[in-house]
Image (cartoon, rainbow, N blue to C red):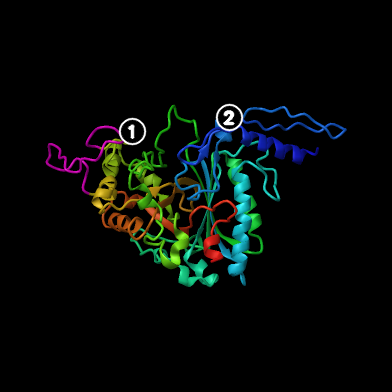
Amino acid sequence: MNDDHHLDISRRKLLGTVGAAGATGLVIGAAGGIGLAAADGGGSGAADATALASVGATEAMFHGKHQAGITTPLQSRGHLVAFDLAPGAGRKEAAALLRRWSATAKALMAGEPSAADTGIALDAGPSSLTVTFGFGRAFFDRTGLVARRPEQLDPLPAFSSDALDPKRSEGDLWVQIGADDALVAFHALRALQKDADGAARVRWQMNGFNRSAGATARPMTARNLMGQVDGTNNPKPADPDFDRRIFVERGGPGGSGAQEWMAGGSYAVVRRIRMLLDDWEKLPLERQEKVIGRRKSDGAPLTGGTETTPLDLDKRGPDGKTVIPDNAHARISAPEQNGGAAMLRRPFSFHDGIAADGTPDAGLLFVCWQADPLRGFVPVQRKLDRGDALSPFLRHEASGLFAVPGGAAEGEYVGQRLLES
């Protein structure tokens, strides 16, 4: 038995020992093992299985109603990549590429080697790896599928805080990679880039991170690079209207008629938001909290309670002013202030060194999910654009909008219902 075959069996053994699937589509393996024994001179060897930590053994499912990476809990490492189809490539080449990408994603998300594996992640389990695929507006022109393009992919309006670099915006195809291990995430990135050779080329790539799993005493809402608890008001899968707000319903807006292929899918708005950290960090704590409308220590509203306590937007202080200022970020972005507009925020932080002006090139790779960006992201961002106290400390440097189809059924590849219908 050669080492590669031995490794494949060991990884399959790991996956056979994982536990039951949870509500997020994750499978937690408590005692899976990967044996990496060297073969002896006669070509035989015995596996010395070693239990993986739960972080490494956690698996996200590739097949399902929705693609992984949308409701999957935040991962510690991420890569966002946009591709443009190669000159001369069209619908046929796009379908072949999505078929290759889906096969690679399915294998790697299960902790198995890809067709042309580089060995980068040999010692690790799946580590919650997710790979999510989406289509940009121009993809439909390149593939002759303009009649199938949803109106939800109409260009986003311009905002006053935009300083967008077109070279790092949009794209024919978009891929989101997330994992709880940096090498597992990079391994998937390399495999997908190699799969694209000849069919598509990278337009832009952004790399991000979150707090590592297990770094806190208990699961907590993430903090961003400003130190703020970020994501408290996110819709929850247990909410009765969650699916209606986040996913395209069959026969609903963006999922009816020519766009039926989007049923079970979602729309991702991607923004590279530079945080002007030097300016932000000069503010005293009390001022930072008034800009946000929440306490920095625990994310609770300035009106009191805990992180999950609803904002009391009418409460006034001894001075007669609202405790949560009228231009506070939490007030302006609250769903009740925006006609119920909601989006599932699932970002990564980024730090790309020091910019030419000597300030940190750091901030948020903002990714939000919604059934309709015209009713989710756009109205909220328009309102923020008109007077958010946080805006002077942010600069939107890149932007993209992508249609992310529903998950692939067994035997399907992602996007097959669009490309082969």
In the rendered image, which residue does mark 1 sit on? Answer: 298
Give me the residue at 71% from left, 37% from top.
9
**Residue 268, how many percent across, how many down?**
44, 55
Disc 1, SS: loop
Q: Main secondary structure of the magenta part?
A: loop
Disc 2, SS: loop
**Residue 252, how many percent across, how many down?**
37, 60
Instruction: State the image quarter where residue 272 is shown.
Output: bottom left
Q: Nearer the viewer, residue 228 or 409?
A: 409
Q: Earlier in the sequence, mark 1 or mark 2?
A: 2
Q: Residue furthest right?
A: 42
Q: Is residue 180 left or right of residue 119?
A: left
In the rendered image, which residue does mark 2 sit on? Answer: 53
Q: Is residue 25 in view from this perspective?
A: yes
Tell me the crowding category of disc 1: few under 14, some 14 to 19, or many 20 or more residues within 10 angstroms, Cα based: some
Look at label 2 and name its amino acid. Answer: Ala
Q: Is residue 402 in view from this perspective?
A: no
Give me the residue at 39% from left, 45% from top.
278
Look at label 1 and name its amino acid. Answer: Asp
**Residue 307, how many percent across, how many down?**
31, 35
Give me the residue at 22% from left, 36% from top.
303
Give me the residue at 55% from left, 47% from top.
62
**Residue 247, how many percent across, how many down?**
41, 53
Depth-wise, is mark 1 or mark 2 nearer the camera? 2
Q: Is residue 363 left or right of residue 383?
A: right
Q: Magenta stretch?
A: 302-326
